[in-house]
């Protein structure tokens, strides 16, 4: 894995809540969507301390975005986002740490 863009806590929905019907392996590539944009981008998720996640799990993951240039200067710690497979929301995420500083929202001077 290259350096992650950010670290997030991911809360996977159960199958009954409309989430995945089976497990996902670390390195899974769903899309993420932030409230401030209509753009979704594929993001690789590398789970800490787990090789697999199952519907209903909560996990911390290092996240690597494919379309990071669309989010330059727009992310901040505590920001929430959706993890999607197409139009289905499979998990909700919260940014815990931003590693790629080009993504950090700049404070007004």
Image (cartoon, rainbow, N blue to C red):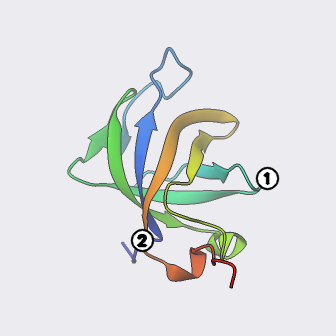
Task: Name the residue at the front extreme.
Answer: 109
Residue name at image x 58 percent, y 75 percent: 103
Q: Residue at x 60, y 40 (%)?
A: 85
Question: Which residue is labeled 2 in the image?
Answer: 4
Image quarter in which the N terminus is found: bottom left
Nearer-the-camera pick, 54 or 60: 60
Q: Position of residue 36 (x, y in %)?
A: 74, 55
Drawn side of residue 5 relative to residue 74, left or right: left
Tell me: 77 left or right of 23.
right
Name the foreground residue: 23 vs 99.
99
Which residue is labeled 1 in the image?
Answer: 38
Q: Is residue 21 or residue 103 the one in the foreground? A: 103
Taking the spot 48% from the left edge, 49% from the top edge, the residue there is 94
What is the x, y in percent for residue 82?
59, 43
Q: How busy is the neighbourhood of tag 1: few (under 14 within 10 Å), some, or many (20 plus)?
A: few
Sooner in the amino-acid sequence: mark 1 or mark 2: 2
The C terminus - image quarter: bottom right
57 up-or-down from 28: above or below: above
- What is the secondary structure assignment of the residue under circle 1? loop
Q: Is residue 2 above or below residue 25?
A: below
| Res. 13 mark | none
Q: Residue at x 69, y 79 (%)?
A: 108
Question: Dot 2: within a 10 Å radius of its alpha carbon, few (fewer than 14), some, or many (20 or more) residues?
Answer: some
Could you tell me residue 29's position as x and y percent?
Answer: 50, 53
Closer to the camera, 106 or 11? 106
Give above or below for 19 relative to 33: above
User: Which quadrant of the figure has residue 99?
Assistant: bottom left
Q: Are marks 1 and 2 in contact (CB under 8 Å)?
A: no
Asked if residue 42 is positioned above or below residue 69 in the image, the reply reads above
């Amino acid at each position: 894995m290259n350096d992650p863009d950010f670290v997030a806590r991911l809360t996977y929905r159960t199958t009954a809540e409309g989430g995945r019907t089976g497990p996902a392996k670390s390195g899974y590539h769903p899309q993420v969507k932030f409230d401030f944009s209509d753009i979704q981008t594929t993001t690789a998720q590398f789970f800490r301390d787990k090789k697999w996640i199952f519907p209903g799990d909560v996990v911390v993951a290092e996240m690597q975005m494919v379309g990071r240039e669309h989010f330059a200067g727009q992310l901040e710690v505590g920001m929430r986002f959706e993890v999607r497979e197409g139009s289905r929301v499979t998990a909700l995420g919260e940014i815990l740490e931003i590693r790629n500083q080009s993504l950090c929202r700049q404070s007004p001077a």
